[in-house]
């Protein structure tokens, strides 16, 4: 009896302390293994025969300082590019997704055209689309057609990414249970109203994380438009590299992208984790709601 | 006298599975009909066909003198006057209770928000839900959600209300509050078709009980007759199983 009591007293006090100690130990091990791993890696790189040459051509502090302002400055072009494209992509992707989801034989041509569009633009390497549009269309020499490369950069990125984003939207639309549409339609809402007020608000909320993921891709792909003569960050770093015979400007460009993209990636992961938590919570709730189905008539039994 | 609902020779198949095999049913104004029968007998499909959620293969459905199965009928217009409440509530999770209730009056009937909300609040108060008006559905119990779903259907002032096993997804202690709402509606003269496994409730509330078996109405009549002295042996068997399960 006294032994039992003793255990009952001791346990709650000892356990958390044991937990703290083991957490501390885990942290120490993680720290040590990280230091050893990266230390070894750094040693391999730094002791390599080509290291001095690489250090000179990629890690030149003077070139870095000299090129950074103009590189950050031209990043404004990339920002402009993806901000404009993102708005257009969100709109066009939605339209494509909705058109592709139209049921019935009447809409077969619409589904066919949108399906071909999505297939083609997901199949083509982005840089080819940018080339074909950026050089091809102005090359036709049709009066009134814009010739600015920036215009074709926006058009090309919008066309490419709308194909991906429409698929993300479509997955979201299809993830909404048909009973939601049935409920909306049963109240007299039209197919469009059901989509607009009931289905899409739920679908869009679910696909925010994958959409952000695509936008991370888009932000990086803005460098591809340098090939049709838009002077953006990548083009600018090439110019700086050519002027200094040193590759450090590319390192500066890489840093700009890291600073820009990593926070967005973290936000995306956080949103995904939150969505998973919320859906699991929802599933648990739904399960609780269906429990006891078999005895559901109990309260009315007395009414005989 | 025009009946509230008239169904003639209704057939519906899913692929090769014939779910409804010739349903004939007349429902008078203010009548409450209980549809009973085993799972898969066609109760839910019948209700979904009356609301045109499921397209009908064959037969005629006439609501308040208008054939809704005729070619060229505006289905959205038909559905305004026929409310349906589902087993799984199907509230819109992204909207507060009040918005769930006012969505259709505002978007379908073109009511102004203030007007629609006043009407919705009156309905919510009538069913003891006024303090839930600004909650999201997932904050509500199953019984509360189902009552909101009923209020949402009532907000369109339907001529006919279809209830599809509305208590089957509820915990036992939540069933009574929903049945009480339906009782009140019946007392108020609402014309209703109720698919249910609650036999005691069906006996209490229905003017007429229809026993569905393999896609046809095998037998129908006043509850006293159907529950005490059914003519068909299949009806007897069904009721015996129900009694055996302790549910009548």
Image (cartoon, grey):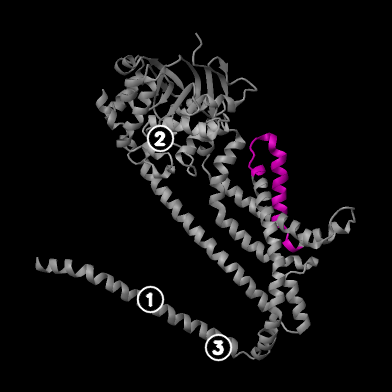
- The secondary structure that most of the magenta stretch takes on is helix
Residue that carries the numbered disc 2 in the rendered image: B146
Q: Find the residue positioned furthest to the left.
A: A1
Nearest to viewer (mark 1 / mark 2): 2
Image position of B112 (left or right of B29): right
Horizontal side of A8 relative to A260 (left or right) equals: left
| Pick the front one: A233 or A1 | A233
User: Where residue B194 sits: x, y (%)?
Assistant: 41, 24
Numbered disc 1: secondary structure: helix
In 3D space, how far apart are the residues under numbered discs 1 and 3 (Cα atoms)? Answer: 25 Å
Q: Is residue A59 visible?
A: yes
> Which residue lies under the disc numbered 3?
A43
User: Could you tell me which secondary element the residue under label 2 belongs to?
Assistant: helix
Q: Chain of mark 1?
A: A
Queried whether the magenta region covers residue A101, the answer comes back as yes
| Chain for numbered disc 3 | A
Q: Is residue B181 left or right of residue A229?
A: left
For the point 40% across and 33% down, which residue is it? B147
Return the mark for residue A168: none
Q: Which mark is residue A26?
A: 1
Which region shows up in magenta?
Answer: A98-127
Tell me the crowding category of disc 3: few under 14, some 14 to 19, or many 20 or more residues within 10 angstroms, Cα based. few
Label 1 vs 3, first from the N-terminus = 1
Q: Are callouts 2 and 3 both on one chain? A: no
Q: Is disc 1 in contact with disc 2, using a CB cutoff of under 8 Å? A: no
Q: Give the label, 2 or 3, closer to the camera.
A: 2
Where does the image place residue A39, in percent across and percent down from the top left? 51, 85
Q: What SS does tag 3 mark?
A: helix
């Amino acid at each position: 009896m006294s032994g039992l009591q003793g255990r009952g007293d001791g346990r709650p006090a000892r356990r958390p302390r044991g937990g703290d100690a083991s957490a501390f130990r885990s942290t120490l091990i993680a720290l040590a293994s990280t230091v050893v791993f990266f230390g070894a890696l750094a040693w391999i790189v730094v002791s390599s025969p080509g290291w001095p040459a690489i250090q000179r051509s990629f890690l030149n502090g003077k070139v870095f300082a000299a090129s950074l302002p103009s590189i950050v400055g031209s990043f404004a072009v990339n920002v402009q590019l993806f901000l404009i494209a993102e708005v257009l992509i969100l709109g066009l992707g939605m339209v494509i997704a909705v058109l592709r989801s139209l049921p019935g034989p009447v809409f077969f041509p619409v589904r066919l055209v949108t399906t071909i569009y999505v297939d083609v633009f997901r199949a083509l390497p982005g840089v080819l689309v940018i080339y074909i549009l950026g050089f091809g269309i102005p090359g036709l020499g049709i009066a009134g057609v814009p010739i600015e490369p920036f215009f074709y950069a926006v058009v090309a990125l919008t066309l490419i990414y709308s194909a991906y984003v429409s698929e993300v939207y479509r997955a979201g639309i299809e993830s909404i249970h048909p009973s939601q549409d049935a409920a909306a339609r049963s109240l007299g809402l039209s197919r469009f109203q059901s989509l607009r007020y009931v289905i899409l608000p739920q679908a869009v909320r679910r696909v925010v994380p994958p959409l952000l993921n695509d936008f991370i891709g888009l932000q990086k792909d803005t460098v591809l438009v340098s090939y049709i003569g838009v002077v953006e960050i990548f083009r600018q770093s090439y110019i700086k590299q050519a002027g200094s015979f040193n590759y450090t400007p590319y390192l500066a460009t890489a840093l700009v992208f890291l600073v820009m993209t990593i926070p967005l990636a973290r936000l995306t992961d956080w949103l995904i984790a939150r969505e998973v938590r919320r859906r699991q919570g929802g599933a648990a709730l739904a399960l609780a709601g269906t429990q006891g189905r078999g005895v559901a008539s109990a309260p009315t039994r007395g009414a005989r | 006298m025009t009946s509230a609902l008239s169904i003639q020779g209704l057939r519906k198949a899913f692929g090769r599975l014939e779910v409804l095999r010739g349903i004939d049913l007349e429902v008078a104004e203010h009548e409450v009909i209980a549809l009973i029968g085993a799972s898969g007998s066609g109760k839910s499909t019948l209700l979904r066909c009356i609301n045109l959620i499921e397209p009908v293969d064959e037969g005629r459905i006439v609501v308040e003198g208008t054939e809704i199965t005729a070619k060229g009928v505006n289905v959205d217009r038909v559905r305004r006057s026929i409310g349906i409440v589902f087993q799984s509530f199907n509230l819109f999770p992204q909207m507060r209770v009040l918005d769930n209730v006012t969505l259709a009056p505002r978007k379908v009937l073109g009511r102004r928000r203030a007007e629609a909300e006043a009407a919705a609040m009156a309905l919510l108060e009538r069913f003891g839900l006024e303090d839930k008006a600004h909650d999201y559905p997932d904050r509500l119990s199953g019984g509360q959600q189902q009552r909101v779903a009923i209020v949402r259907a009532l907000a369109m002032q339907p001529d006919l209300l279809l209830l599809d096993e509305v208590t089957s997804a509820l915990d036992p202690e939540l069933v009574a509050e929903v049945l009480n709402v339906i009782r009140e509606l019946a007392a108020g003269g609402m014309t209703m078709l109720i698919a249910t496994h609650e036999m005691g409730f069906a006996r209490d509330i229905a003017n007429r009980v229809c026993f569905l078996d393999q896609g046809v109405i095998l037998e129908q009549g006043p509850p006293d007759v159907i529950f005490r002295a059914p003519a068909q042996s299949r009806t007897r068997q069904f009721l015996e199983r129900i009694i055996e399960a302790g549910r009548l």
